[in-house]
Image (tube, rainbow, N blue to C red):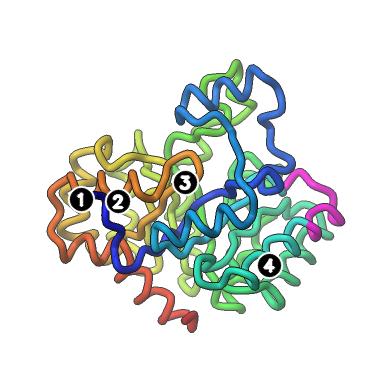
Amino acid sequence: MNVPPARLIDFHSHWGTERGWKGSPYETAEDREALRGYFKWGMSFVSDEEQAVQFRRANVKAMLDFAFTHTMDAGALRDQHDYAFDYARKHPDVVLGNWIGIDPTQPAHVKELERCLSEGTGLVGLTVHSFTPAGTPDQPEWETCLNMCIEANRPILVHVGMSATGAGTRGGMGVTLEGCHPRYVDRVAAKHPGLNVIAARVAWPWQSEMIAVALHKANVWMELHGWSPRYFPDELKREIGKRLRKKVFFGADYPMLTHERLVEEWREEGFSSGVLDDVFSGNAETFLTSIGVQ
């Protein structure tokens, strides 16, 4: 029987509800088929309550990411965030907080980020996608938002490595993978030593570079959503048990990958119980305490 860990903190998952995928680029049958082929997930949705039940069953507390809100107008963006904050208030035992995705070239979006940082329920952080109009996080359009996060002592999430968005479609939905190189994590962390930067996903095909950045910068961490541990590069597996032991957070990518499946596959990789405790919750608890989040 797959017994869940005593505590599991997930630094990145999506919503299992249909509302949580509002604005998604996966509107056509062709695009949905590509997503199904990548994750073996058929975009079936659950209710708000069913999602909370699934999280409780896995003993998980999750950071949730809408992922596609940067294309919305300001009114729709605010409505979506209010939905997320209301959900977090109703289910504080399973929701750690929310990653906020905006287009920083739109002043109304920047103002909405400011509102979320000051009024949002739970931990609120900024998620940076290089395929937004502002581009990579080292571009000047992001500066105001990064400084807001520094002032609020809240982290940013920067996606690195292979992206599921657009994978298997002609033209990749316009996403270029170069924008997901760890060099952009390095540049932002160097320029803003007061900013906490979390690199999202396994950084393949640039995993060595990402390991170097995480080891070099004390304000850089990694969370590994979207990948089964079975397929982690060997170098990453070695370093998780050694130099990266205190730098890695658990990330799932629910609903595409379930928490139960990933916990079991982490256990199967031969990591010590101490390493697993750190990855599943210990490192996250230390980090959250350092930024004043209980």
Q: Which residue is mark 1?
A: 267
Q: Label 4's element? A: helix
- Residue 41, percent from left and from top: 50, 31
Q: Label 1's element? A: helix
Mark 1–mark 4 Cα distance, whole angstroms, equals 33 Å
> Above or below — where is 250 with respect to 287?
above
> Above or below — where is 201 with respect to 189?
above
Kind of residue at badge 2: Val
- Residue 218, percent from left and from top: 34, 69
- Residue 70, percent from left and from top: 72, 48
Dominant SS of magenta comes to helix
Kind of residue at badge 1: Arg
Front of the two marks 2 and 3: 2
Mark 1–mark 3 Cα distance, whole angstroms, equals 18 Å
Tag 2 near tag 3, CB within 8 Å: no
Q: Which residue is mark 4?
A: 85
Magenta region: 70-79
Kind of residue at badge 3: Asp
Which residue is depicted at the point 64% across and 73% down?
89
Picture disc at residue 253: 3
Name the foreground residue: 250 vs 214: 250
Report if residue 190 is visible in the image: no
Name the foreground residue: 159 vs 135: 159
Earlier in the chain: of badge 4 and badge 2, it is 4
Q: Which residue is mark 2?
A: 263
> Above or below — where is 173 with respect to 45?
above
Which residue is depicted at the point 39% across and 63% down?
59
Choose top left, top right, bottom left or bottom right for residue 121.
bottom right
Mark 2–mark 1 Cα distance, whole angstroms, equals 6 Å
Which residue is depicted at the point 64% across and 17% down?
30
